[in-house]
Amino acid sequence: MCEAATGYRSCLWVRDLTVGQQMCVISGTGHVALVTYRGSSGTTSATLDVKVWRNAA
């Protein structure tokens, strides 16, 4: 999934996400994560699934 990702966003609003939406995150130290949005309770928190590959980038 993350290998084929082509978009870039520096910020996401919870209100703009749909349940099941996935995004890739690359850290400054070379870790890659696949983040899946599972839902939210209000506007201040969200439930996420995160799978991390260390030193993958």
Image (cartoon, rainbow, N blue to C red):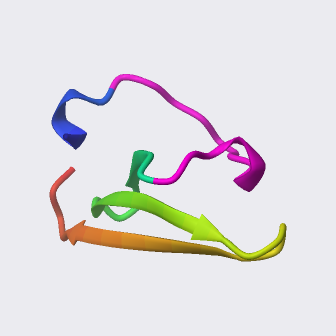
Q: Magenta stretch: dominant SS?
A: loop
Q: Name the side, left or right, on which 30 lies relative to 17.
A: left
User: At which x and y percent is residue 15?
Assistant: 76, 49
The N terminus: image quadrant: top left
Residue at 35% across, 65% down:
29
Residue at 41% across, 46% down:
23
Q: Is residue 16 magenta?
A: yes
Q: Name the side, left or right, on which 25 lies relative to 39.
A: left
User: At which x and y percent is residue 42?
Assistant: 82, 71
Seen in the picture, residue 4 relative to 43 is either above or below; the reply is: above
User: At which x and y percent is residue 46?
Assistant: 64, 72
31 vs 3, nearest the viewer: 3
Residue 53 sits in quarter:
bottom left
Q: What segment carries the magenta color?
A: 6-19
Is residue 27 visible from the viewing direction of this image? Answer: no
Residue at 71% across, 55% down:
14
Seen in the picture, residue 8 relative to 52 is either above or below; the reply is: above
Q: Name the side, left or right, on which 27 lies relative to 12.
A: left
User: At which x and y percent is residue 52?
Assistant: 24, 70
Q: Residue furthest right?
A: 43
Residue 47 sits in quarter:
bottom right
